Amino acid sequence: MKNILLTLLILSTIAHYSFSQELKFQPPWNNPPKSAVEFTVAGIDNVPDLYGEIENPQLVVFFAGNQFMVIEELITAFKEEHPQYERIFVETLPPGILAEQVKGGSLTIGNLKITHKPDIYTAGEGRITEMKDYFSETKLYAKNKLSLMVQQGNPKNIKGLQDLKNAQLQISMPNPAWEGVGEQIKKAYVKAGGEDLLNTVMDTKVADGTTYLTKIHHRQSPLRILNKLSDVAPVWHSEVVFQKLLNHPVEEIHIPDEQNITANYFAGVLKEAPHPEAAKDFISFLTSEKGKSIYQKYGFMTQF
């Protein structure tokens, strides 16, 4: 009986430790807006990709999710230059999800339904081109390149994209169905190892479970690396820069230019923007030297 109780105690301790470790790096990875009651519970009540004032906003921006790390500083600086805009609401979900929200008019997360119409939508060039009829104007404001995120010390000795063929490697991969970066990474696979590498990572390893397809890679991929659930994750360079700024135990494996992809990020003002003047002011700020300097801090390219 004592042995059974001891075993149960050990298993309980291991489970508690494992759960604690899993929550250790949980987002939000920014300073939430101040309010009378602050109630964020890791793993339970935590909505890191909805930011700001959801009630009667004066500006609504749907940002490509991989730019979540920029939002706090960007919105604060914008408000300093334009104090007339006190209530700003931002979403940083995958651009494919945001595109469906724009087209359908609503989004539900958990028990919360959001019906705000955006003033501005940002995404990669391909998605913006597909949706060109929705915008009154679009502007290029930043660029990015791909990298590989691995655990600190690079325990699996990963040197490049070709290594992702390894049957033992656990990969965290954005789902191309709604994450634009997924399609970009597929192109990089072909550049680095042809159709063989692409098919191995996206077919064979998906089928056997060693490639994990994310729903929201800018949150899931870092967490899977940090919690040692995945060995490697193709991500944007800026995402590794940000995790390192947080002193999280990750490392970056650079992808050579000849195998890499450059993403062009555009901001589009919606033709049916509820707050057209605010949208105009925000686009101007986004492409200003101040806006560009904030993006540069997090690893984005803004000189072109």
Image (cartoon, rainbow, N blue to C red):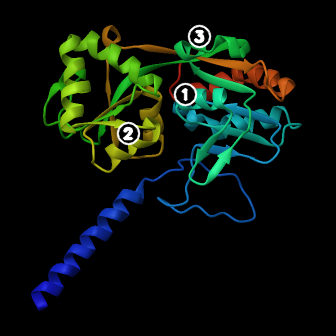
Pinpoint residue 55: horizontal percent, then vertical percent. Answer: 79, 48
Identified at 62% across, 15% down, the residue is: 131
Q: Tag 2, which secondary structure?
A: helix
Q: Residue furthest front?
A: 104
User: Three-letter amino acid code at disc 3?
Assistant: Thr
Residue type of the residue flagged with mark 1: Pro
Q: What amino acid type should be assigned to the residue bearing mark 2?
A: Ser
Element at badge 3? Answer: helix
Residue on which the image places disc 2: 221
For mark 3, what is the residue?
129
**Eyeballing the image, is 137 above or below 31?**
above
Please identify the quarter of the rendering in which residue 199 is found.
Answer: top left
What residue sits 71% from the left and 65% below the top?
37
Q: Is residue 58 left or right of residue 296?
A: right
Circle 1 sits in a helix, a strand or a loop, which is it?
Answer: helix
Distance from the alpha carbon under mark 2 to that under mark 3: 27 Å
Q: Determine whether, in the image, residue 138 is placed left or right of residue 155.
A: right
Q: Is residue 73 above or below residue 33?
A: above
In the rendered view, would you say 194 is above or below 167? above
Image coordinates of residue 302 in percent, x first then y, are 59, 16
* Residue name at image x 70 percent, y 16 percent: 134
- What's the distance in space between the residues labelled 2 and 1, CA to CA? 16 Å
Crowd class of label 2 (few under 14; some 14 to 19; many from 20; radius 10 Å) = many
Do residues under tags 1 and 3 come within 8 Å of each other at their CB atoms?
Answer: no
Q: Residues within 10 Å of mark 1 (few under 14, many from 20)?
A: many
Residue shown at 79%/34% (left/top)?
59
What residue is shown with label 1? 95
